[in-house]
Amino acid sequence: MRPNRLFALLAVAPFIAIACSSNASRQGSLVTPTTRELRTTTTTEATTTSTTIPVTTTTKAPLLGLGQGSSGPAVLAMQQRLVALHYDLPEANGSFGAATQQAVYAFQKVNGMARSGRATDDVLARMANAGIPTTMVPAAGGTHIEVDVARQVLFYVQGGVVGKVVAVSTGSGNRFCNKGRCDVAVTPGGAFRVRGKVRGWQEGELGRLYSPSYFNGNIAVHGSLSIPPSPASHGCVRVPMTSADWLFAAMPNGMAVYVLNGPNVPPPFSDEAPTTTTHAPATTTTAPIGSSSTSTSSSSTTTSTTEPATTSTTGIPAPL
């Protein structure tokens, strides 16, 4: 090779190298953007864990205090307090039985408390500071009966003072039928007089009544084996059996009976509404139990009926 050509080659070689290097670089720059790193997106599916929530059962704590079956000095003290407040209780003997429960019901009703029939701490506290209930018809005077349908209690009033408070159960407000006739079980409000009595058990078309004293058509105050703390009768005023006998003896024919907070409607299966008044019925002079007659001065604004004192069922409509 000639020296001149060799020199020319040596002079051009770096440029060729640079050109190759530059081409490689360009190729690299071309390859790089087109050959991108593939990013693998991994989707992890969340694992759903099903948790069963246990069913929450709310168990009411048993009522504390005194109730049926309780006995001892605490029960005796409570009974003595109820007697002092004139709630009807045959005896204070330290044993909490059915009669004591009815007296506790009566106290709870009069004082607007929950009708549990138990002497819980709040009941005992109220009892300690309570007073004797007052008559709802102070203008009546004398001896008479007051029935409060709203509170489900009966007051036996003597000389303007409540002598006894009795738990009762009046008309349920439910519809009922008998022998093809239907009506609503209500205890109508109004001022009435005792108009007929039956001593002992009487078989009625709708059940048994013990020593009923009728005062408004077929509605009577009578003893019953079932005295719930709420209205449950067909219209009569049910009283506990422990109160039935003395009430029968204390309610002679002609005695005034006031029913308060009851609807002004006829008694069940009656055609006319009773005449009601806000005034006291006429004064009644009543002969002792067992005498042959009762002298009654009737007021034109009442449903008073003069009838002989009797224990016969003659003339008494089918009872409720």
Image (cartoon, helix red, strand yellow):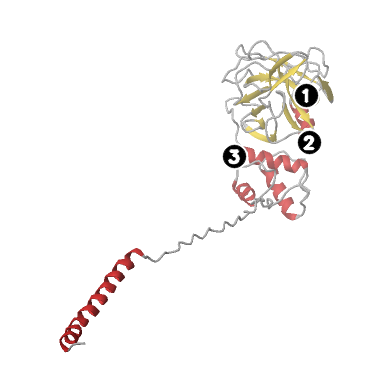
Bin the neighbour count of mark 1 within 10 Å (Cα to Cα): few under 14, some 14-19, many 20 and up.
many
Please state the horizontal and vertical placement of residue 145, each as a whole percent of the image.
67, 27
The 10 Å Cα crowd at callout 2, few under 14, some 14 to 19, many 20 or more, is some
Tell me the kind of residue under disc 1.
Pro
Distance CA(mark 2)–CA(mark 3): 24 Å
What residue sits right under mark 3 in the picture? Answer: 112
Residue kind at label 2, given as amino acid type: Thr
Residue wearing tag 1? 212
Under tag 3, what secondary structure? loop
In three-dimensional space, the C-alpha distance between marks 2 and 1, rounded to whole angstroms, equals 14 Å
Q: Foreground: 109 or 234?
A: 234
Closer to the observer: label 2 or label 3? Answer: 3
Q: Quadrant of the C terminus?
A: top right
In-front residue for pair 50/283: 50
Q: Residue furthest front?
A: 1
User: Residue 18: percent from the left, percent from the top?
Assistant: 22, 78
- Residue 116 spot, x, y in % from top left: 67, 43
Name the residue tied to disc 2: 242
Q: Residue at x 73, y 13 (%)?
A: 181
**Occupied quadrant, residue 163:** top right
- Amino acid found under the numbered disc labelled 3: Gly
Between 215 and 300, the residue placed more toward the observer is 215
Left or right: 159, with 33 as reference point? right
**Callout 1 secondary element:** strand
Decide: few, some or many residues near mark 3? Use Cα within 10 Å; few <14, some 14-19, many ≥20.
few
